[in-house]
Amino acid sequence: MNPIERIPQKDPFLFIDELVERSEDSIHTRKLVKESEDYFKGHFPGNPIMPGVLICEACFQSGALLMSYKDDGISGKTAVVSRIQSAKFKQMVKPGDMLDIKVELKELISPAAYMKAVASVDGKKALIIEFAVTLVENA
């Protein structure tokens, strides 16, 4: 099974392509930002920039993937974003960029997981964000 299949998001709302590395409390994923992405048709024609909210979503999906590997009662649950704070956008993400996403689990107080993520391109930070997810029962 492709590790990305562990999360419920699917194309066209899947913003991570591969799992690079994972430890108990951290994960590194990547997304190749393709010029053919549908959102570039309107954001912004002639000067395409990946929407910041989608960079955030890539971090959230990476955090959800990390949580999918936790085995302490998490199976049968989905990680849903419940708090976003301290989002700092540092640079634009453009078509052709390889977005590296690193998420660290700071604290797990069930049913909440507190995380910090850094998304970067060529070693330069594009986004730093802290967020929490709440684990909810699958329907």
Image: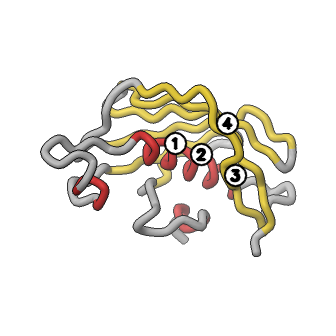
Instruction: Name which of mark 3 and mark 1 comes first in the sequence.
Output: 1
Q: CA distance from mark 1 to mark 4?
A: 13 Å
Q: CA distance from mark 2 to mark 3?
A: 11 Å
* Whole-percent x, y for residue 11 in the image: 43, 68
Q: CA distance from mark 1 to mark 2?
A: 6 Å
**Most foreground residue, 92 or 22:** 92
**What's the amino acid at mark 3?**
Met
Q: Secondary structure at mark 1?
A: strand
Q: Tell me, yes or no, whether the two marked residues, 4 and 2, touch with CB atoms within 8 Å.
A: no
**What's the amino acid at mark 1?**
His
Say the numbered circle drawn on residue 67: 3
Label 3 vs label 1, nearer the camera:
3
132 vs 62: above or below: above
* Residue denoted by label 2: 22
Residue 95: tell me if it is visible: yes
Instruction: Name which of mark 3 and mark 4 comes first in the sequence.
Output: 3
Residue appearing at x 71%, y 46% in the figure: 82
Instruction: Name which of mark 2 and mark 3 comes first in the sequence.
Output: 2
* Residue denoted by label 4: 115
**What's the amino acid at mark 4?**
Met
Q: Tell me, yes or no, whether the two marked residues, 1 and 2, touch with CB atoms within 8 Å.
A: yes
**What's the amino acid at mark 2?**
Arg
Instruction: Name which of mark 4 and mark 2 comes first in the sequence.
Output: 2
* Residue denoted by label 1: 28
Which corner quadrant of the image does residue 107 belong to? top right
Q: Quadrant of the C terminus?
A: bottom right
Label 4 vs label 2, nearer the camera:
4
Q: Quadrant of the N terminus?
A: bottom right
Which corner quadrant of the image does residue 37 belong to? bottom left
Residue appearing at x 39%, y 24% in the figure: 90
Instruction: Name which of mark 1 and mark 2 comes first in the sequence.
Output: 2
